[in-house]
Amino acid sequence: MRKNETEPGMQVAFHHEITMRDGVILRGDLYRPALQGKYPVILMRTIFRKKTLSRGWGCYDPSFYVKHGYAVYIQDVRGLGDSDGRFVRFTADGADGYDTIEYLGTQPWSNGNVGMYGDHYVGFLQFQAAARHPPHLKAICPFQTHVTLNRNNDTRGFPQFYAHIGWCMAREMSRLVEGKYSAEIIEKYGAVLRDYLMNYSSIVRDTPAAQLPMAELREAFSIVDEYFTTALPCYDDMQAIKREGRLMDLDRLEVPALLLSGWQEDTRNTMIGHGDILRRTARGNARQSEVVIGPWAWGEPMSQPENALYIPENHFSVEQELLRWFDKWLKEKPVEEKKPFRLYNAATGSFVELGEWKDNGNAVLCLYLRSKGAANTRLGDGCLTPAPLEDGVDEYIYDPENPMLSMEYGADCQTQEDREDVLVYTSDILQEQTDVLGVIRTELFASSLTPDTDFMVHVLDVTPAGQAILVGAGAARAKYRESWTPVLLEEGKPYAFTILCGNVVYSFLKGHRIRVEITSSDFPHFQYNRNTGARPEQDSAYVKTRNRIYHGAAMPSRVMIPLA
C-alpha cells in the first residue's frame, strides 16, 4: 500500500488491501475526511480500473462526498486493475462484494453503514452483492443497469451477443496493456486482438456470432472463452442462465435501490420495471426504492453542464440526488421526500412524478392499421384510425443482407422510411395534446414465407416540420412468439404477435401526429434474423422473405397507447 496522502479536508490511501474469504487480495483507493471520526462508506466496485478513472468523475467524484462527511472506497474487482485473482464473471461477484462491504462496515473510521453506487456492470455488481444480504449494506444506487446482462431481458430471442463479445475483448485488451499476461501471450495475441477491435463493426455485420474469428483467442483469454462456451449455447435454457447467476429475482433484495437511467439506455428501459418490482414484491426497505429516468444518453455522464442533454431548466443534479439518498439511508437524516417515480417527459421538458407505475396507464388509446386506398402501404401511405375498417394486407421483402440500421430514442427516423422494407402508418393531425404514460403495446397479425423472421415496431412523433422522432420501439422473433420454446412458422399463415414498445412517458403535442413503422431488422441493436429457422448466431445462410401485415375487422392489427 502506498503511503497515505492528504489533500485539503481529505486523506487518501491508494492500493488499500482487503483479503477475500479465499485469500485473494483486492485493492482499492480509500478517500475519507481528514478529521478523525466515524463516517458512512460509499463503495464502488469497478471493472473500469480505479487508477485510470478521472478525478472529475461527475457524480462519482469522491471529494464531493468526502466534503459532505462520507468515506469513499473505489475497488478494482478480482483479476482487474490492481487486484489479484482471475476475473471470471458470475463466480465471485456476490461473495467479493459481501466480504468488501463487511470489512468496510467494521473499520474504526466507519459508522457501520455502507452504500454502493456505479453504472452498467458496476450496477450489476451491486445487485449481486445486495442479494447476499451483507448486514452492513444499507442502500445501493445502480445506474443504467439491470439484473441480467442482456439489456432486453424480457424480449425473447434477442440476446446481445455481439455487444457481449466486444465487451469481452475490450476487457482483455485493457489487461494486456496493464501487463497482466506474459510476454509470450502479448506478442502472440496483442496485434490480433487490436485488429479485431479496430474492425469490430464490419466483422460482426457479416459473421454469425458463433463463427466469429475471435474464437481463436479462447485459449489465451478466459472471458472470451466464456463467451463461446457459456453465453452462446445456453440462452434458450433460462434455468441454465439462472444457475450461472445471470438472472436474479429482485424480490430477494432487502435494501433500497435508487435506480437512475436515461431514455436512450434501451428500448424498454427495464429500470422502471425493476423499481416497480422492488416496491411491490421485495423485502424490507427495498420497498422504498426510487426510479429516476432522464434524457441522458447511454454510457455518458449524467447531469454534466457540457452535455447536450443536460437539464438546466429543471436544475436536476445527480450528485445532490445521491447525497439525499445516502443521507437518508447511511446517516438516517431527515431529507426531502420525493415521489418514487420521477420520469422526464422530453416533449414538455419536465419531470412526471408518480406514486406508482401503471403499465396500462389510466386509459388506453387504440389506433388501428389501415392502408390508404387499394395500394399496398409503402413509403408512408398507411393510416392509423380509431376503429378497424376494411380488411387489407400490406407486404414487404426483408433481405437479411441489407438490415435496417438502429436508431436511438429521440432520433429523426424519416430517412429510414425511404427503404422498401418499411411499412409506415400515420394518424391524423392531433387536435389536442396526447399524454402517454405506460407500456405501448402493438398487436400485429403477420405472416412470412420462411420458418422464422423478426418484426420490429417503432412508435414515432411526427412534428409539423416533418421530423419523425423515435419515442418507443419493440421487437418479436417469430419462433419465440409463445414462449422460450421455439415453434417455427407455417409458410404464409397469419399469426398474432404482441410487441411491447417500451415504457414511455411522452406527450404528442397538438398539431403533431402519431406514427408506427413496421420492418424486420434493427441492427446492431438486435441481431438480424437470417430467416432459416436456425439460431442466427449459429447460421451462415441467408434467405430473403416476403412478410405480410394484416389489418381490418378480421385481423385488427393495432397500437395500444396508455394515457396519463
Image (cartoon, grey):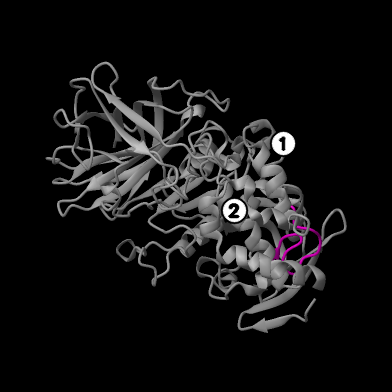
Say what secondary structure mark 1 lies in.
Answer: helix
Is residue 508 rendered to the left or right of residue 113?
left
Q: What amino acid is at disc 2?
A: Gly
Q: On the rendered image, what quadrant is the C terminus found in?
A: top left
Q: What amino acid is at disc 1?
A: Arg
For the record, the magenta segment spans 74-88
- The local crowd at label 1, few if under 14, some if 14 to 19, many if 20 or more residues have their Cα within 10 Å, is few
Residue sitting at x 73%, y 64%: 80
Say what secondary structure mark 2 lies in.
Answer: helix
Q: Nearer the viewer, residue 239 or 397?
A: 397
Residue sitting at x 37%, y 21%: 494
Residue at the right extreme of this rendering: 23
Q: Position of residue 240 (x, y in %)?
A: 70, 34
Name above or below for residue 561 compared with residue 37: above
> Label 2: which residue?
123
- Discs 1/2, front: 1
> Label 1: which residue?
243
Q: Position of residue 270 (x, y in %)?
A: 48, 43
Name above or below for residue 450 compared with residue 348: above
Q: Position of residue 462 (x, y in %)?
A: 21, 47
